[in-house]
Image (cartoon, rainbow, N blue to C red):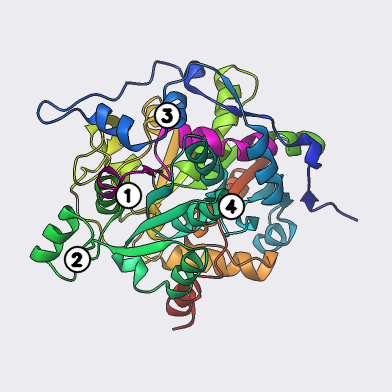
Amino acid sequence: MEKNQISLPVDDLPKKWYNILPDLPEPLPPPKEPDEGPSRLEFLAKTMTKECLSQESSSQRWIAIPEEVRELYIQAGRPRPLYRARRLEKHLKLKKTRLYYKREDLSPTGSHKTNTALAQAYFASREGKRVLITETGAGQWGTALAHAARLAGLECVVFWVRSVYDWKVDRRTLMQLLGAKVYASPSKQTRMGREILARDVNHHGSLGIAVSEGLEYTEEHEGSVYCLGSVLNHVLMHQTIIGLETIKQFELIDDQPDLIVGCLGGGSNFGGISLPFVGEVLKKKRECEFLAAQTMASPSLLKGRYEYDFGDVGEHTPLMKMYTLGHKTEMKPIKADGLRYHAAAPIISLLRHRGIVKATAYPTDERAVFEAAKIFLQCEGWLIAPESSYAVRAGIDEAVKNEKIGQEKAICMNISGHGFLDIPAYKEKILS
């Protein structure tokens, strides 16, 4: 029998996160203060956990995963399987191209986001915090943090981009079942939210606005701490558990990926699977390419400028050097709204600037990506998140392209989440 599922025993769960900062081809440009206004670095020090801020600039290549976090990872189903997509290969009539996919949709909340949520909740609890505050775009991060907060005995407040809050009723219900307070952003809970609503009562919101609201709310509520779901270095580092497992799984079957594909908004799931492989490429231990799949609603790596910018609309964060469209850019809402962010993570941006990471983007009507998700469902049997559909679309496109070239090639796609709470989007895009 052909082996389609490649699993790791629990004993092989990585004990350390990989921090790529010491291995980057050049030092990562540090965050800096704007020319005017209060210190943003001091603001972050007041609103985020000390441990996460320490990890943000750590020069240690390997950072131990606390035993309590590893136990939570195991409870949440880690290690997660890698699959050979044999049925999809057959459907595409592939002869030279092998397709694989990593299953991050198997977490309790249905996405890779639990990998950092569980860690951040643990650190916050250790530091005596009572409430976790955050933003969310597609809702996967808000759900993951609500889940992690509940396990840690903490409260959770989520500012959710309004355009998604309005249609993902079932995911909102899941967050509320986990005990979270969920506000549509822009909201009336913050000064910034009220100002935006005064100008446009129907404003659809954005991740940049939701981040600003969460940071403002955190500053005004004692005992609370802000937890970010993407972009920052420590978030990508927590997500490297994905790539570290994947390296071991390919070793088990004596194969190696020639191309890693992932969707990219801020960069957490793409960084999670790719950075351990990137580190080995930089050390000349392997050859591999990396492709980020984006939406034309926010094609930061393709049309952005590599420069310092704020991470949020309200300019609470320090300036970070990123590929950015501009922190006040209006972006059209899409169903894969977790990808609709104005900038890419500083680490991913540097790798893009050095030509190590490549990017592609798909139209905002999303027909091509939803069609890829339908093909994937009918071949492999899994309903994936709209965001993950971008990775599958890019993986299929690259496989078809490679068949024309006729080279032996292995492509690995990261499935960042499931689509069971995205059924209305599939109904609209596929069945209408």
Q: Are marks 3 and 4 in contact (CB under 8 Å)?
A: no
Point out the frontmost of discs 4 and 1. Answer: 4
Identify the mark nearer the N-term, 3 or 1: 3
Q: Which of 318 and 380 is in front in this view?
A: 318
Q: Are marks 3 and 2 in contact (CB under 8 Å)?
A: no
Identify the mark nearer the N-term, 4 or 1: 4
The three-letter amino acid code for the residue at tag 4 is: Leu
Q: What stretch is highlighted in magenta?
A: 217-246
Identify the mark nearer the N-term, 2 or 1: 2
Name the residue carrying label 1.
341
The three-letter amino acid code for the residue at tag 3 is: Lys
Residue 331 in the image, given as x and y percentages of width and height: 24, 56
Looking at the image, can residue 374 be seen? yes
Q: Residue 151 carries which label?
A: 4
Badge 1: residue crowd in 10 Å (few <14, some 14–19, many ≥20) = many
Is residue 394 highlighted in magenta? no
Name the residue carrying label 2.
203
Identify the mark nearer the N-term, 3 or 4: 3
The three-letter amino acid code for the residue at tag 1 is: Tyr
Q: In which quarter of the image is the C terminus?
A: bottom left
